[in-house]
Amino acid sequence: MWLSDNDANDAGEHRRRRGPSRRLVLPIRVVHAVSGAGEHWSARGRRMLVVDLPFALPGRFWRGNLHTHTDRSDGALPPQEVARRYREAGYDFLAVTDHFRAAYGFPLTDTRALRTPGFTTLLGAELHAPRTELSSEWHIIAVGLPLGFPPPEPGESGPALARRARAAGAFIGMAHPAASLLTLADAESLDAAHAVEVHNALSAREDRADSWHLTDILLTRGHRLGAYAADDAHFQPRDPPACAAWVQVRARSLDPRALLAALKAGHYYASTGPDLHDVALHDGMITVRCSPVRKILLTGGTPGAQVIEGDGLTECSLPVAMFGHGYCRVTVEDATAGRAWTNPIPLS
Ligand SMILES: [Zn+2]
Ligand SMILES: [Zn+2]
């Protein structure tokens, strides 16, 4: 086991840090300055999503995919077969998000009949409207839409459409920013977004699965956004495998309303493999407990990172001091390069 400094040059010095804590003595509880969850307005007038750590909240984690296509748009499989595959892969819930385009009759795929004991669905769509700086259309995930949500109106912009979907009750995700080549100006204009799709498994085919760079810039500019991972599964023959990127949502029950409320409150983490059992902030230290991993990282709005590497790491404790009063976030990586990410954790 060893410690590495990911960006010692940038930090201008080598910092000595505490090694991984094998036996945690810190109390496992959420202790940070922000209490409660929901929307607040920052001093700069921006809407902020205050993210509480979900790990100590009542209930349990429910695994789900927030971005999925069926043959109601350009997916290969009917909704019932898509739901069956996710259910059999051990998922607890699924949001089908077919492309809400005129070419497909503006589908808002009704998956309620596919709910079974132990498996539920959220209703949603991937919304499109012209246009971003470098693309002819927006891609916006809306989960929790009501049936009958009206199609885009002529001239309605992507950000306006997203605001309308949010007002209708949906959780709004900024879909695959890297693959869409979203600019910072685009991203800042999507002011209805609850979260950024920081990992899109389908975009791995063009080596643009991750969108953390843009997300970190948004966060440092005062936007408090969640971070989710999703498949964007289409089940077409040449696509990457589905069931590869998901969220774990903390809620008291598998009721769709409870899941949706938890998503809006930021009570979830994202993964392509590892499980996060507990992440807590206490006395300037982040403690992490997880399934066995080879690396645990703490990053944030300051270049550099706190890093611990080793075989079969399942817990550690890392200082947050280098991130000042900004934010930090935890990434873990397992032996097969699967990763899990917490939502950004506000430090002020
Ligand atoms: Zn898309
Ligand atoms: Zn999609």
Image (tube, grey):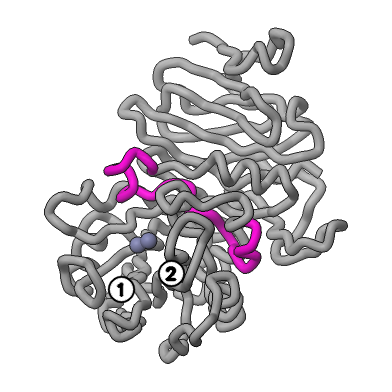
Residue 141 location, quadrant: bottom left
Q: Please tell me whether residue 324 is drawn above or below residue 147 in the rendered image.
A: above
- Name the residue carrying label 2: 254
Residue 190 location, quadrant: bottom right
* Whole-percent x, y for residue 174 in the image: 51, 59
Badge 1 local density, few (<14 within 10 Å), some, or many (20+)?
Answer: few
In this figure, what is the number of numbered marks?
2
Question: Is 203 covered by the magenta stretch?
Answer: yes
Dot 1 lies on which element? loop
- Name the residue carrying label 1: 117
Give the left or right position of residue 14, taking residue 129 as reference: right
Dot 2 lies on which element? loop
- Under mark 1, the amino acid is Pro
- Under mark 2, the amino acid is Leu
Q: Could you tell me which residue is drawn at 68 percent across and 17 percent down?
A: 10
Name the quarter where the C terminus is drawn: top right
